[in-house]
Amino acid sequence: MHELGIVMEIVRVVDELAKEQCFTHVDTIVLQIGELSPVVPKYIEECYPAAIDSTFMEKTKLEIEIMPGNAMCRDCGTVFNVLKSSGACSKCHSKDFDILSGRDFYIKEIKVPEE
């Protein structure tokens, strides 16, 4: 499970940003995780409490947005969701496609209370 390392890196990045921007509290961290990403949202959620324990972020909430894993068929040009279509074009059933989205993992937003 590499998710603990990922969550620890998120905490490090937010801590560094907090020092640069001079904020001492974070309400919520919003992550975007693609459906095709190797990062498992459930494991991120499970690791998160341990990663923020005894840090300035220990009361920070975590929100995860799942981004669709979309592809474009090279044969007919149809855009389709790879997982919902079982890895084949939903129109012509070709398995020759380019991934458009869904592999990414981002810190989308760090919500800080107004002081």
Image: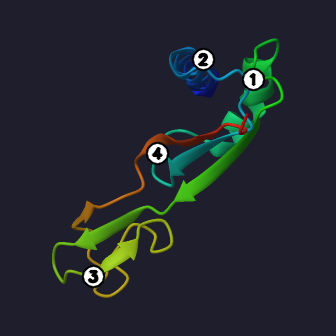
- What whole-number distance in Å separates the C-alpha atoms at marks 3 and 1? 43 Å
Q: Nearer the viewer, mark 4 or mark 2?
A: 2
To which residue does mark 1 refer? Answer: 57
Depicted 36 relative to depicted 88: above or below? above
Circle 4: is it few (<14), some (14-19), or many (20+) Cα within 10 Å? some
Q: Residue furthest bottom?
A: 91
Where residue 99 appears, as percent x and y from the top left, is 29, 59
Q: Earlier in the sequence, mark 1 or mark 4?
A: 4
Q: Nearer the viewer, mark 3 or mark 2?
A: 2
Tag 2: residue type? Asp
To which residue does mark 2 refer? Answer: 15
Q: Are marks 2 and 1 in contact (CB under 8 Å)?
A: yes
To which residue does mark 3 refer? Answer: 78
Where residue 27 appears, as percent x and y from the top left, is 75, 37
To which residue does mark 4 refer? Answer: 37
Circle 2: is it few (<14), some (14-19), or many (20+) Cα within 10 Å? some
Helix, strand or loop under label 1: loop
Q: Nearer the viewer, mark 1 or mark 4?
A: 1
Tag 4: residue type? Ser
Tag 1: residue type? Met
> Which quadrant does the N terminus fall into?
top right
Where residue 9 appears, as percent x and y from the top left, is 55, 19
Q: Earlier in the sequence, mark 3 or mark 2?
A: 2
